[in-house]
Image (tube, helix red, strand yellow):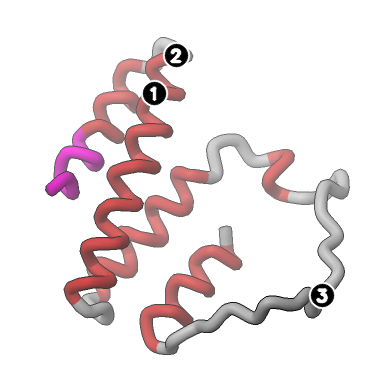
Amino acid sequence: CEDYDLWLRITADHQIGLLDEFLLTRYGGHPDQLSGSVPNLDRYRIRSMLKLLYQNRINEIQRRSVENCIVRRAEIVANGYLKRNNRELYERFIVIANQYRH
């Protein structure tokens, strides 16, 4: 999630474009990859987005986009906790989702 946080900060200040060509070879799925060993990475993505909101460095359009993303991800995380009968964490993430729902 460090990459996710980095890209959020970069795109808050700089416009990013998309090239219609491959410039790298992606090597993923190796055994020491964090996404395979750290459960529920969306919690950290939500934290990065909340940090971006609190830093007050984005415009209103970006803010709305981040808030909508927080709602979607918080609902996904909450439903995962509900499936695992963790009511406390379910409610915590539902509160976050509701706080940013428009």
Image vertical order of residue 91 relative to residue 26, above or below: above
Q: Name the residue under label 3.
A: 24
* Label pair 2/1, CB-CB below 8 angstroms: yes
State the separation of the CA atoms marked 3 and 2: 38 Å
- Tell whether position 35 is magenta: no
Residue drawn at x 28%, y 44% is: 71
State the separation of the CA atoms marked 3 and 1: 35 Å
Residue kind at label 2, given as amino acid type:
Lys
- Residue 10's spot in the image, x, y percent? 47, 81
Horizontal relation, residue 73 to residue 84: left or right: left
Quarter of the N terminus within the rendering: bottom right
Residue drawn at x 44%, y 14% is: 83
- Residue 45's spot in the image, x, y percent? 46, 53
Image vertical order of residue 48 relative to residue 23, above or below: above
Residue drawn at x 45%, y 71% is: 8
Residue kind at label 1, given as amino acid type:
Asn
Of tags 3 and 2, the one toward the viewer is: 3
- Tell whether position 101 is magenta: yes
First-in-chain label (3 vs 1): 3
Q: Mark 2 points at which residue?
A: 83
Q: Mark 1 points at which residue?
A: 79
Which residue ends up furthest to the bottom in the rendered image?
Answer: 14
Instruction: Specify the segment rendered in magenta.
Output: 95-102
- Residue 78's spot in the image, x, y percent? 36, 28
Q: Which of 20 and 64 is in front in this view?
A: 20
Picture quadrant of residue 31: top right
